[in-house]
Amino acid sequence: MPPMEMAANTPQPGGMAPLGNEPEAYTYFTEPEATFIEAAVERLIPTDANGPGARSAGVAFFIDQQLVGAFGTAAKMYRNGPWGTAPTPMQGYQLRQTPAELYRQGIAATQAYCNKTYQSGFAALTAAQQDDVLKGLDGGTIKFDDLPAKVFFEMLLQNTVEGFFSDPLYGGNRDKVGWKLVGFPGVAAFYANKITDYNKPYNVPPVSIADVQQGRPVAEGHELMHHMAMENAKALDKVNQ
Amino acid sequence: MPKTMKPVDAVLIGVGWTGGILARELTKAGLNVVGLERGDFRNTNPDFLTPGVHDELAYAVRNKLFQNPARDALSFRNNVRETALPIRQFGSFLPGDGLGGAGVHWNGLTWRFLENEFKLRSNSIAKYGAAVLGEDCTTADWGVSYQDLEPHYDRFEYLCGISGKAGNLNGKKIAGGNVFEGPRKRDYPNPPLKHSYSQELFRKGMNEIGLHPFISPSANNSQPYKNPEGVQMGACAYCGFCERFTCEMSAKGSLQTTLLPVLLKEPKFELRTNSHVLRINVDSTGKKATGVTYLDPSGQEVIQPANMVFLTAFSLNNVHLLLLSKIGQPYDPATGQGVIGKNYTYQTGTQATLFYEGKNFNQYMGAGSLSMGIDDYNGDNFDHSGLDFIGGGVISQSTGSARPIQYHPVPKGTPRWGAAWKAAAAKYYNSSMGWGAQGSVQAYRGNYLDLDPTYTNEHGQPLMRMTFDWGKHERKYSDWLIGKYEAMVKPLNPQSYVLSALSEHYSIVPYQSTHNTGGAIMGTDPSKSAVNTYMQVWDCPNVFSMGASAFPQNAGYNPTGTVGALAYRTAEAVTQRYIKNPGLLT
């Protein structure tokens, strides 16, 4: 099958100009909180010889956007009390805090720890000191009065990985740096003709949802799922009517 | 006063696999059927089309297609000494939501259970002695045999267009198929899928050590297929967005791809979506259902009278509705009496991950049920003498779910974050592969479902409470299997590997399986089972409780093939016998 190539100026639904050029702005995090998160995610996935890290991938902005949406406001969480006083680890997340609230309180508690221990906020610490703080949260050696530090850390780590590897439409994985790091080709994903290319590298520039929706061209040989799925669906609709 | 609708012959609670099969078979027999589906209407075009459906965050991580626990959840504890707490976020299992149910987001592995499974209790006692089960093990015979189900398995396989290769055709063993399977009368409707590089290595390696690898039966079609209903399906694109996702190619068997086009044209079938059933209504004797009460999309209560009520929801929701409707005696673990909620079972996982230097496995290419399996350590396919457990599981080297948020394996000893983690994730994303066993779970006296005394759902009804932990058979099997894994790793010669046995206790946090089985089990004794082998509730025979909630315990396979076969068997008995002479079928 020939590769699908669409011109970059293919009209979009509604005839809009290409999307993705709006300036990003934090809507949940305060300025100090955003500074904290930018510094923390950059230690979790640092910039190094392997490529850009979480900070320049937009992970802090990704988390901010998640926290004002359904995830942060716990739209898909069971929220009735009573709140268990001694849950077992097997019973999962049992905090009354929404994820957004957990971030606010977790950041404040970590900052308080840093101020007390280093007389400095987290973002101003050296990289080694920042790593020590994160290891303390991860390993349970740093404890907060009314918040399990480990639960806060696990959410931060999980959301950082999400922001690094999710489709760029959510604000992270900017320039698809997460996908390029590991070699994930993105969403085009038609591999019926590739699955038996045993042990052959498949190095193509990854394709995002916006690339497909906005008609940006894909690499030679990278077959575009979208077109085939649309044609297939139309043909089947006709037959099965 | 709630509005009362015109009476119908049958009402279906939930429209997924079992609801769709019953809707088709009952309307074909001339009955008027209403299907009540709590979720949205959805169809391949436009709901399942790319590129939007290839969104790992929304679908696989934020649970786009799954039941919303803010509306209805379960509570959970490991044993009766603990206080159950609500499952605030689904993790271990992910019940579906919306038309087609979990049959939209499944992978498509479609098995027939082994012949031995259907007489597991009596066969195990006969072969290994009664002591092997253990005092608290309530594993039971099914009351049906493999031979009873064979024609119904066949119908379901041809409905979906299962891709695979027979391993036992009328008793003749065929190399390259699963030689342990029960005899089938004809081969699968479609040839096997193409298999990946890691699967080719696995196949060769397992052959070398004398095991019997085969391409697993898959509801991801290897070629375009027109099923016996006249519905045309597409061919799998090996896109790697299958489990937790939809199918943009109409290549994965689901209600939408196999039956919906026929049902939407059927004048005797009426589908009402966004209609949530609150309870089954019974008459003053309590032995006969009169219909159901449901909430319409705007939240108004509506009564739908019906001569027959079919529980065709997800297994857990079938049990929940029986408990809420006070149909059948709730199970009490203290006395062992009662049947509703009894023998809740699940699935175990024992995993191997292998790391290589410089190989290109491209594990993101593939299909949900593209799997090279071995069945040598499943069921009673191996001698359990002296092992002190029964059961086993199919082992699958699967390819096609390597999406990077959830799949980025790193070798043992790698830090969880930082530069070393990043380097390992980059190095091994394309150079690792693995396999997992899907282990059987036996039934135990203390593992059950009932109504929670404290927590309620959005309708003010008690949540269902799950009390569950691994038992002797699961723990011993997993430990024993790790030893076998060491031998399986050798011919594959990786740079390093990680083996992970069963967790110490069952946890609702990490994803394991949505094979929640039991709770309204089938059998031949009304004091020990909730439904007979035609899925009729013993105490209320015009209520039929379908699905995997009827499994007396869970086998070492995915459940959907057996769910489909049991639905066809019930449909046949109802249309050929029950409607002429309503009452308990024998």
Image (cartoon, rainbow, N blue to C red):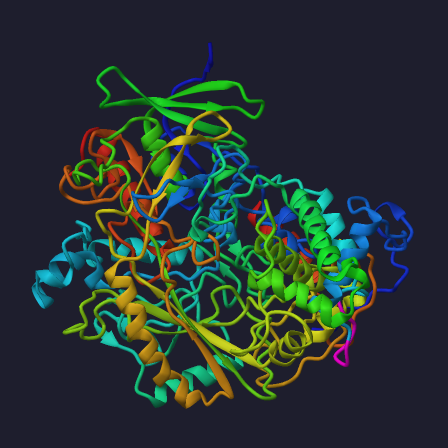
Is residue A171 in view from this perspective?
Answer: no
Is residue B52 in view from this perspective?
Answer: yes
**Residue B257 point in image, percent of width and height:** 52, 51
Let me know if residue B284 is in the magenta part.
Answer: no
Quarter of the N terminus of chain A within the rendering: bottom right
- The quarter holding residue B115 reads bottom left
* In the depicted structure, whether residue B41 falls above or below residue A50: above
**Residue A35 point in image, percent of width and height:** 81, 56
Please give the name of the residue rendered at 57% of the width and 37% of the height, measured from the top-left corner. Answer: B40
* In the depicted structure, whether residue A189 falls above or below residue B45: below
**Residue B549 point in image, percent of width and height:** 32, 45
- The quarter holding residue A178 reads bottom right
**Residue B209 point in image, percent of width and height:** 33, 88
B242 displayed left or right of B387: right
B324 displayed left or right of A61: left
Q: Which residues are magenta?
A: A48-53
Give the main secondary structure, helix, strand or loop, of the magenta stretch: loop
Q: Residue furthest top?
A: B1
Question: Is B229 or B481 nearer to us in this picture?
Answer: B481
* In the depicted structure, whether residue A218 falls above or below residue B569: below
Looking at the rendered structure, the number of numbered marks drawn on it comes to 0
Quarter of the C terminus of chain A within the rendering: top right
